[in-house]
Image: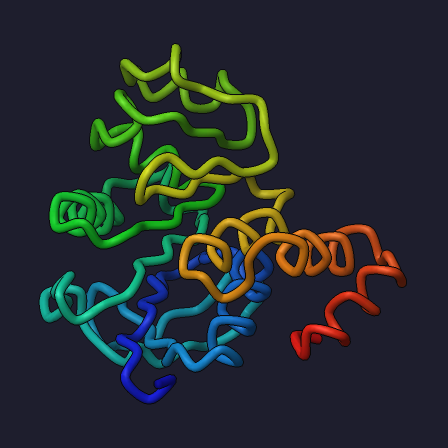
């Protein structure tokens, strides 16, 4: 069955925050989801940590029907230019098509500017960070490590493990006590959680 899963698409762009999506993409790949990188063009991009990434696909060629999920990591460019606005517009296309989107850190501000957080429960780094975008969704802001509302996941920059927990739960990679144990292992280094995962064959 794993071979039939549609890819997960990870947006990549200059200054992308390396640490924010690694837990999610690693365990999605282990569960049989191909991870494909998508950028404005197929020219290489460089992360904030200096990693050079060769994109698999240009954004213009990405269609929701070919994807299981779009992941939008943070990047300095979300707040310094409008260069990443096309990724937020693509997120709207995905959500309109019923395909989930997961945004962390600065990408949440991009979605706020696009109006995608006005009517959905969401979180980010802090509420005033999103308020600075002028969006209309302040009343839906939730003080939480990560939030899922329908097909949209949001998280702040210090919560890559919680972000991954929501992604893995939404796509059904782990559920129930196994998902909780996965989170406790990687977030809290809980040895009892490892035993739960080992029994479930999910370590």
Q: Is residue 125 above or below residue 53?
A: above
- Name the colour scheme: rainbow
Q: Residue furthest top?
A: 139
Quadrant in which the N terminus is drawn: bottom left
Along the line of sight, the residue nearer the viewer: 67 or 115: 67
Rendered residue at 67%/52% (across/down): 180
Q: Where does the image place residue 95, in percent across and percent down from the top left?
A: 20, 45
Q: Residue furthest right?
A: 191
Along the line of sight, the residue nearer the viewer: 8 or 46: 8
Q: Where does the image place residue 111, in percent across and percent down from the top left?
A: 29, 36
Q: Where does the image place residue 148, in percent across and percent down from the top left?
A: 43, 38
Rendered residue at 23%/51% (across/down): 87
Dividing the picture into quadrants, the one containing residue 23 is bottom right
Quadrant in which the C terminus is drawn: bottom right
Q: Is residue 101 above or below residue 80?
A: below
Rendered residue at 48%/71% (across/down): 28
Residue 129 placement, left or right of 202:
left
Along the line of sight, the residue nearer the viewer: 16 or 135: 135
Rendered residue at 89%/63% (across/down): 191
């Amino acid at each position: 069955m794993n071979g039939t899963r549609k890819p997960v698409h990870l947006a990549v762009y200059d200054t992308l925050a390396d640490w924010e999506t690694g837990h999610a993409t690693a365990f999605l790949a282990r569960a049989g989801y191909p991870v494909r990188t998508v950028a404005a063009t197929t020219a290489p991009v460089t992360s904030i940590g200096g990693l050079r990434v060769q994109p698999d696909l240009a954004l213009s060629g990405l269609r929701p029907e070919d994807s299981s999920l779009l992941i939008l990591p943070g990047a300095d460019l979300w707040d310094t230019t409008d260069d990443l606005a096309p990724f937020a517009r693509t997120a709207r296309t995905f959500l309109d098509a019923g395909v989930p989107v997961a945004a962390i850190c600065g990408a949440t501000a991009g979605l706020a500017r696009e109006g995608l957080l006005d009517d959905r429960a969401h979180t980010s780094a802090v509420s005033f960070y999103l308020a600075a975008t002028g969006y209309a969704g302040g009343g839906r802001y939730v003080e939480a490590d990560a939030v899922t509302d329908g097909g949209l996941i949001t998280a702040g920059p210090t919560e890559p493990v919680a972000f991954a927990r929501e992604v893995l739960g939404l796509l059904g990679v782990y559920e129930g006590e196994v998902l909780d144990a996965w989170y406790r292992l990687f977030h809290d280094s809980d040895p009892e959680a490892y035993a739960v995962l080992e029994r479930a064959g999910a370590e």
